Image (cartoon, helix red, strand yellow):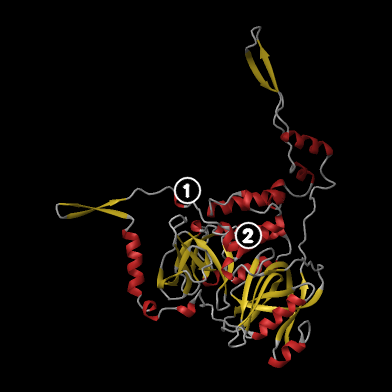
Amino acid sequence: MTINSDFLGSVGQERFDPIAGTDEEEAEMEQDVEVANDNEEEVEGGNVKVKKKPKKSKEASRSMSFDSSLPSSHTYLGTDLEEISGRTILEDDSVIELPLVTLPGTILVPGHIIPLYSHNQHEVAMLKSVVDSTDKTFGVVALRMDEEYRHIIAGIGTTAEIYSVKNEMDDASGISTITVLAQGRQRFELKEYRRTITGRVNVKVLAFINARIIMGTVKVLPDTELGEVFQGVQPHIHCKLCCLEDHEEDFKVAMDRQGRIISCVKMTPKSKINRFSAANYTWWPPWVYKMYDTELLMKRVKTELQKWDDTLSSDKLPKDATKLSYWVTQNIPLDDSLKLHLLSINNAVQRLRCALHIICKCSILCCKDCNEQIADMSNVFSMSVSGPLSAYVNPGGHVHETVTVHQAENLNLIGRPSTDHSWFPGYAWTIAQCKRCSAHMGWKFTTRRKDLIPHKFWGLCRSSLIPGMSDPDHKDKGDWTPVM
């Protein structure tokens, strides 16, 4: 399978205007106009006075009328995809062989959707054979660059089950294309891989093109759960006293002969016994158990996430600890090494603790190549019901994990706005590059309909970003590692 490592592939880049693309002054002028429009000019006696417009409240500026279900349904791929029913769950710790799809700068997380579009005949034939199989499952692994800029395949991946597919063929050239939507199911460890035309792939289909498919031997990783830590230690009386906190409070009321209340006395004092009091019967104090308590940990994670996106309510987040840990792993914009580290953890509590430490320290997003600040984490928001960071595919077959932010800085716009193949219906995209190193950072999306809110936002490629860690106690951030 031929792997295209050009991460600068952008939506509709084949239709790039070379004249507009080289005119950097036009892009800078557009940014200047946007800044100038924020103020009003008032002329008095030939002198120009700038009168600032009143600032909108944060809630008003971040309101949204866009249908957030559209991006997650990938309507830009068309509405004629064939639905495939079924759900495959592989046995934990089982060792199996799967065909692999390697994607540069993309890491699939269980529970999340990845779109694929391919005109590579080797990959098309492989995906067709997966659709015809009983479990409709293949493996997705990230393709990374080492220090010597060589491609290496990540050791951790995720199984993907195809649930929607569309096959097409160009009558003139006879080239087949395939579009699939697949959902991540289970994590696996890649034991070994090889290129072959055997295995699960139909050899008759591939013989005439001499295709070599990547087949991997993988071990399905389990998600372990922590049991009740105080089982066998907590006295029964503690359970009864803890339950009193959930009951309605009892009051004793004194009234005079006319029925007027003289005094009201609370009869049920607040219990000093809680579910962590049993820790006093163990070797560890209560605060140790609170660090690993699932309920408290989930509450802390949701609180920190709302500091990033104040429109993100707890009702929109998963209630299950494992699902929440995968949601956080998918939606916080991390570089490949941190994201793969989270994906390699086999326990939801440990994964949430590690993610919480990252969330508390990550305050900005910087260019991966030159460390120029691009966005503040407080500007991250969700344009999709699946979260602020989702995977999208362009007509060239490049998959981009894109995080949406309200504001960005230190970017130059290249070319003119285009609505072709827009991931967000009703919005036009414009290519954005880093102002310092000219690296591709993502796109600016501007509305083409007056009724759509927000009127503009930015979609930044996760593979082009690196999180900025803020720690006032340590000036040297190079040796920082997330706590387990």
Q: Name the outermost residue toward the left.
A: 45
Residue 303 visible in the picture: yes
x and y percentages locating residue 13 in the rendered image: 48, 77
Give the crowd class for mark 2: few <14, some 14-19, many >=20 residues within 10 Å.
many
Q: Which residue is mark 2?
A: 328
Q: Residue at 63% of width from left, 13% of height from top?
A: 262
Residue, far right: 232
At 78% from the left edge and 67% from the top edge, which residue is drawn? 88
Image quadrant of residue 106? bottom right
Q: Earlier in the sequence, mark 2 or mark 1?
A: 1
In the picture shown, does residue 319 fall above or below 427? above
Q: Nearer the viewer, residue 318 or 339?
A: 318
For mark 1, what is the residue? 59
Residue pictured at 79% horizontal, 66% vertical: 89
Q: Nearer the viewer, residue 472 or 139?
A: 139
User: Can residue 484 be seen here?
Assistant: no
The amino acid beneath tag 2 is: Val
Check disc 1 and give the amino acid type: Glu
What x and y, as percent, mark residue 171? 60, 85
Callout 1 crowding tier (Cα within 10 Å): few <14, some 14–19, many ≥20: few
Secondary element at tag 2:
helix
Quarter of the image where the C terminus is located: bottom right
Tell me if 214 is positioned left or right of 120 in this view: right
- Number of marks: 2
Residue 381 placed where, x, y %? 53, 57
Q: Residue at x 45, y 72 (%)?
A: 431
